[in-house]
């Protein structure tokens, strides 16, 4: 949404996504005095075409340099002037080297953004934040992304269009598209910002690039800066042995929070997922659907220790599949994502993620065994509650406190599984459905 101030400068209203809700931040809508901030003098620029080293998640990378530009102030004209100076330079070597590094490391869109940011931080580490943000914007636009630029009274802000809903981060809606705010310091307090001004230095590039996807498409991340952590999990029925790379886990540690289905559909380390599924499959292949679902449920309930995110991480953290096997603890949403992945991949059954106000579980549509218990009808089919955090409960058993509540249902759409189990399912958020109160509360008799 855009409003106009008396000085005819557009102000973008900032909103924030908090979990699945979007709330307006308190707005300070006042006439703003024009207060340009002069940038500090940067270090002497490197010569065009030089190469230099920079660090990226523990890896030392080499990239072509670029003769840097000083941004005189945050005024629109000064920003535009500096941006177009880059356009007059030969930027092909640096763009080519960054694309090459991205392909070599198997980076998705988010990590391309972080690669560019790490590059700019090293190249302009002692310079003004204005210089760094402008260079990041120029490089991302010329790498094909629809990244826009905005300013406050004192700083430049990158606006990233992200396909998935991102939780706990401010965004603005421009031309009916959500753009998420990223400052020079990605951990800065966004709540302190009340007004943004659009500041696109090249109008011809606006809206022509691609949006940023946070999903992983099965291209393995090839960061190997840390040691491999060995993991042995055994619940007495199913046994799994695996190793998880520490470097990749550090990359995922502060990944933007997104909708739950996106974690089910992302394949961060395809070989790791293939190994897990390959070990589990022969241990359950002679079971019926219900027997196998119970075995998988027992496994997820018992091989992990439970702890909520605030106690363990100090902040909200949702795990990708691989992270469950690295950390010492997980919680209900992590277990639901993992269980949904296992049931869809190993049994080929429709799975839905069931979200209560303070709890997540799953529901499964069985096709070859008679099911009784807590569940609901969806699209004419019956889905049975399967709770991987309700330790000791078999399929069809919902925690008593949630049986009369109305949850949200997240549908994981059907997809054909490949031989390698690499099957990112397209997520879809469906309407709320109510768990009927009159369903019999019975356990499955197996």
Image (cartoon, grey):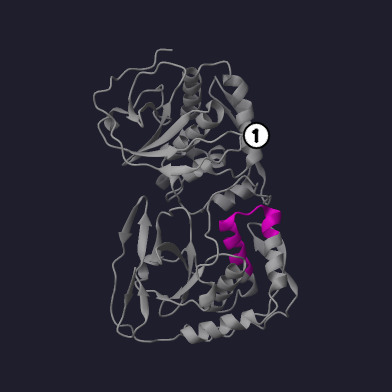
In the rendered image, residue 84 lying in the magenta stretch gets the answer: no
Q: Would you place residue 15 above or below residue 393 in this image?
A: below
Q: Is residue 251 left or right of residue 183?
A: right
| Dominant secondary structure (helix, strand or loop) of the stretch shown in magenta | helix
Q: Quadrant of the C terminus?
A: top left
**Residue 266 occupies which quadrant of the picture?**
top right
Percent position (x, y) of residue 109?
58, 57
Camera-side residue of 401 and 112: 112
- Hey, which residue is sitting farthest right in the picture? 50
Can residue 38 be spotted in the picture? Answer: no
Percent position (x, y) of residue 219?
65, 47
Percent position (x, y) of residue 269?
62, 43
**Residue 56 occupies which quadrant of the picture?**
bottom right
Q: Quadrant of the N terminus?
A: bottom left
Q: Would you place residue 164 above or below residue 377 in this image?
A: below
| Residue at 75% in and 75% down | 50
| Residue at 26% in and 35% down | 405
In the rendered image, residue 115 lying in the magenta stretch gets the answer: yes
Percent position (x, y) of residue 181?
44, 65
Q: Is the residue marked by circle 1 packed among few (<14), some (14-19), or many (20+) residues within 10 Å?
A: few
Q: Would you place residue 417 above or below residue 193 in this image?
A: above
Instruction: Identify residue for label 1.
Output: 420
Q: Is residue 438 left or right of residue 389?
A: left
- Hey, which residue is sitting farthest top in the picture? 446
| Residue at 33% in and 56% down | 22
Residues rendered magenta in the picture: 101-119
């Amino acid at each position: 949404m855009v409003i106009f101030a008396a000085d005819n400068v557009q102000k973008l209203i900032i909103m924030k996504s908090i979990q699945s809700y979007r709330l307006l931040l308190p707005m300070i809508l006042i006439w703003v005095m024009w207060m340009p901030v002069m940038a500090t003098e940067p270090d002497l620029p490197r010569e065009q075409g030089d190469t230099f080293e920079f660090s990226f998640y523990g890896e030392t990378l080499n990239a072509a340099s670029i003769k840097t530009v000083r941004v005189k102030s945050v005024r629109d004209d000064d920003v535009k002037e500096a941006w177009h100076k880059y356009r007059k330079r030969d930027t092909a070597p640096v763009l080519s080297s960054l694309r090459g590094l991205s392909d070599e490391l198997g980076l998705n869109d988010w990590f391309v953004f972080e690669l560019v940011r790490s590059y700019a931080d090293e190249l302009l580490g002692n310079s003004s934040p204005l210089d760094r943000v402008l260079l990041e914007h120029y490089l991302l636009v010329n790498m094909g992304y629809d990244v826009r630029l905005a300013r406050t009274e004192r700083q430049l802000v990158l606006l990233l269009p992200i396909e998935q809903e991102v939780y706990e981060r401010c965004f603005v809606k421009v031309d009916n598209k959500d753009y998420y705010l990223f400052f020079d310091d990605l951990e800065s307090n966004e709540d302190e910002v009340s007004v943004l001004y659009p500041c696109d230095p090249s109008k011809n590039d606006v809206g022509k690039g691609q949006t940023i996807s946070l999903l992983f498409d099965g291209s393995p991340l090839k960061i190997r800066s840390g040691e491999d952590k060995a993991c042995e999990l055994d619940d007495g029925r199913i046994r799994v042995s695996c190793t998880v790379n520490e470097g990749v886990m550090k990359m995922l540690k502060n990944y933007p929070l997104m909708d739950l289905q996106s974690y089910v559909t992302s394949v961060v380390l395809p070989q790791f997922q293939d190994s897990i599924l390959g070990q589990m499959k022969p241990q359950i292949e002679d079971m019926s659907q219900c027997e196998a679902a119970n075995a998988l449920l027992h496994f997820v309930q018992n091989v992990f220790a439970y702890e909520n995110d605030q106690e363990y991480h100090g902040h909200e953290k949702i795990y990708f599949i691989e992270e469950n096997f690295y950390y010492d603890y997980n919680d209900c949403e992590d277990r639901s994502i993992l269980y949904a992945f296992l049931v869809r991949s190993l049994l080929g059954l429709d799975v839905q993620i069931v979200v209560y106000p303070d709890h997540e579980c799953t529901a499964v549509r069985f096709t070859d065994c008679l099911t009784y218990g807590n569940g609901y009808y969806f699209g004419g089919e019956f889905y049975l509650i399967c709770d991987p955090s309700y330790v000791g409960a078999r399929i069809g058993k919902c925690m008593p406190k949630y049986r009369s509540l109305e949850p949200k249902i997240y549908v994981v759409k059907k997809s054909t599984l490949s031989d390698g189990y690499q099957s990112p399912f397209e997520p879809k958020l469906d309407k709320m459905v109510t768990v009927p109160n009159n369903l019999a509360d019975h356990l499955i008799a197996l």
